[in-house]
Amino acid sequence: MPNKELENFTEHFTDWDEYYKETKVEVMPWYEKNLDHDLENELESNNYNVGNFLDLGTGPGTQAIQLSKYNFDVTGTDISKSAIEKAKKLSNEINFLVDDILNSKLADKKFDFIFDRGIFHIFDVSQRPQYVKQIKRILNDNGILFLKCMSIDEKNLSDDDMPHKLSKQEITDAFEDDSDVLRIDDTVYNEAYGIKPKALIAVLKKKFP
Ligand SMILES: C[S@@+](CC[C@H](N)C(=O)[O-])C[C@H]1O[C@@H](n2cnc3c(N)ncnc32)[C@H](O)[C@@H]1O
């Protein structure tokens, strides 16, 4: 195990709320104050800056906060009540809500854009169709999902540790019936677990209708 944060994380990953209750968000492995560089590149290169934007599994809320600096109307959801309580203290402009994406109560076709930074890769293969179904339901026609997940090429983290490491083919298999796969590229997460873990960034456009 690379470092103490990961030890702390793997002990608690089965109970997200407990983890957020007892841990400062700044020491969580995924904490990134700035906008994720892959999402920033996508927004800048496509001139995306308005619309309803969901930061799914918002956790520390940092990505939602960075997105609110554009002209987006931002919602941040997380399964953890403690995470949402903490995030709410950071901004009044963002609609922070407790919501489980697998049983989401969000309205149909609500979002033009969704950012998933580290949620899809939590779920087991058997849960993926339910995730895809909910994303399809809450995305607007032609809406876009930006998906960032751990890559199968990341060899420094044990396969026993959370999260799952994914291949490009697994992402394609999960989404291609409902989405046009615009791109899936190799990238990295910023510093986490004491390294820069290899990651994938996928851009998936909901098929219309
Ligand atoms: C790896 S963290 C990423 C947090 C955030 N996206 C970021 O990049 O800082 C995964 C997040 O997903 C949340 N989560 C786990 N299962 C979820 C679910 N079923 N629905 C919504 N959020 C979930 C966790 O509470 C946690 O905040």
Image (cartoon, grey):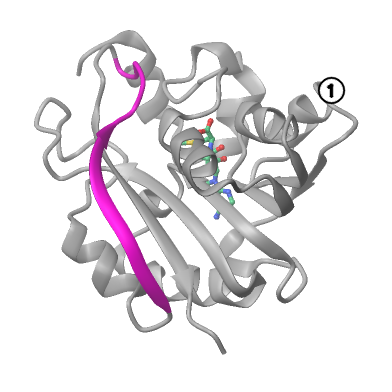
Q: Describe residue 160's horizontal placement relative to residue 108 as left or right.
A: left
Q: Please give the range of residues in magenta.
A: 179-193
- Using the image as rendered, state which of residue 18 and residue 126 is in the foreground: 126
Q: Position of residue 81 (x, y in %)?
A: 73, 40
Residue shown at 66% from the left, 70% from the top:
138
Q: Secondary structure at mark 1?
A: loop
Depth check, front residue: 174 or 112 = 112
Name the residue: 34% across, 19% down. 192
State the count of labels.
1
Q: Is mark 1 within 8 Å of ligand 1?
A: no
Name the image quarter holding residue 64.
Answer: top right
Q: Give coordinates of residue 68: x percent, y percent.
A: 75, 34
Residue 200, position as x, y percentages in the image: 27, 44
Residue located farthest toward the bottom when viewing the structure as drawn: 209
In the depicted structure, whether residue 188 falls above or below residue 94? above
In the picture, residue 172 is in which quadrant?
bottom left
Amino acid type of the residue tagged 1 in the rendering: Lys
CA neighbours of label 1 inside 10 A, class few (<14), some (14 to 19), many (20+): few
* Residue at x 71% of width, y 74% of height: 109
The image shows residue 209, relative to residue 119, as above or below, that is: below
Quadrant of the drawing holding the C terminus:
bottom right
Magenta portion: prevailing SS class: strand
Q: Is residue 165 left or right of residue 19?
A: left
Residue placed under numbered mark 1 in the picture:
89
Asked if 193 appears above or below 142 in the picture, the reply is: above
Q: Position of residue 28 (x, y in %)?
A: 48, 19
